Amino acid sequence: MRAVEITKAGGPEVLQLCERPMPEAGHGDVVIKVAYAGVNRPDALQRAGSYAPPPTASDLPGLEASGEIVAVGAGVSQWAIGDLVCALLPGGGYAEFVATPAAHCLPVPEGMGLKEAACLPETYFTVFSNVFQRGGLQAGERFLVHGGSSGIGTTAIQLGKLFGARVFTTAGSDEKCAACVELGAERAINYRNEDFVAVMKEIGGADLILDMVGGDYLPRNVKALSNDGRLVQIAFLQGSKIELNFALMMMKRLTITGSTLRPQSDLAKARIADALRAQVWPLLEAGRLGPVMDSYRSASILKNMRTLHVRMQKHSKNAKYILKKLNLIL
């Protein structure tokens, strides 16, 4: 089968078309014929040599995809050949076919196409597990989302609003702030000319903050939290090392936690998938929320892939992109 591999650590130019063996469906696995693959920031980090795949995962990038199940392994009873699914992947999504645990697949929501469904797994698994399972967001709480115009941010805003929270967010332009408000944020803070700490203090502080920025945001987040508030860290775009006065954390009785999705066990991811299917998929099928994505097409699939990675590096409108299936030259 054809795939796109990382030939060495570097820029988008290191992505090359290649031939790889067809994956097989092991016990508990399915093989998906990829219709669309999501292109996310972790793919760019892996390409740059900053995010190595787990030892048992494919070295091919691509952490989510949608398509048709073409093979079912032993022990799989919930899926059949021909089912249309979207799936969280251990890697390997930049290919014509990919194998993944059956428990990490979800049905394409009714009324949604394969293209849109490919955008769901990575962000929805990440947001739901960190905001609701780890962060414990409750209806009525003040929820601050950093990076509101990113793929994670747009998903967190929509889910927070639908589950009854008061959602606040930060973004880097008035245009992005307006888009965040349209998605459901009560207040969008342009971090270039406003201080999110002051804004949140005026309303009593944030009960929960979801942060992917890191760096000097960490001590500012501590100041912006209310008493008994929680900070969930999911990335460190501005660095993971910072000086922090923990006395304020103690006095305010704060909880600081965080996680990454890919290294978690198959069982942990399966539990997230079950929760999403029960609590979020009905909202998707009702049209009450959906992915916000940037789609780009070109004459060459390799050029397409490289272009998407370039756009991520330049911090485009959001960090969610779609790659058309490899066997179609557009």
Image: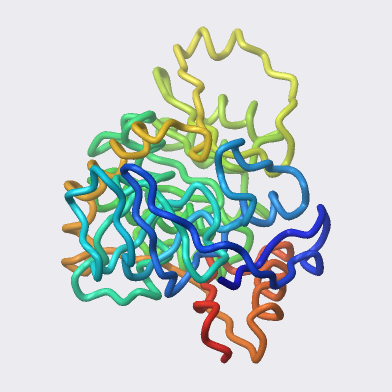
> Residue 63 at what x, y percent from top left?
51, 54
> Residue 115 at what x, y percent from top left?
40, 75
Give the left or right position of residue 217, taking residue 284 as reference: right
> Residue 169 at what x, y percent from top left?
48, 50
In depth, the one of 275 and 86 nearer the eye is 86
Does residue 244 lie above or below 195 as drawn? above
Q: Residue at x 69, y 70 (%)?
A: 18
In depth, the one of 37 and 25 nearer the eye is 25
Q: Residue at x 57, y 56 (%)?
A: 171
Image quarter of the N terminus: bottom right
Does residue 87 lie above or below 264 as drawn? below
> Which of the 4 quarters of the picture holds residue 223?
top right
> Residue 150 at what x, y percent from top left?
54, 58
In depth, the one of 175 and 294 nearer the eye is 294
Give the left or right position of residue 24, taking residue 216 as reference: left
Q: Residue at x 79, y 59 (%)?
A: 7
Colour convention of the picture: rainbow
> Which of the 4 quarters of the picture holds residue 54?
top right
Inspect this view and state whether residue 90 appears. yes
Inspect this view and state whether residue 182 appears. no
Q: Residue at x 37, y 64 (%)?
A: 183
Give the left or right position of residue 13, taking residue 39 as reference: right
Image quarter of the C terminus: bottom right
Q: How many marks?
A: 0
> Which of the 4 quarters of the picture holds residue 287?
bottom left
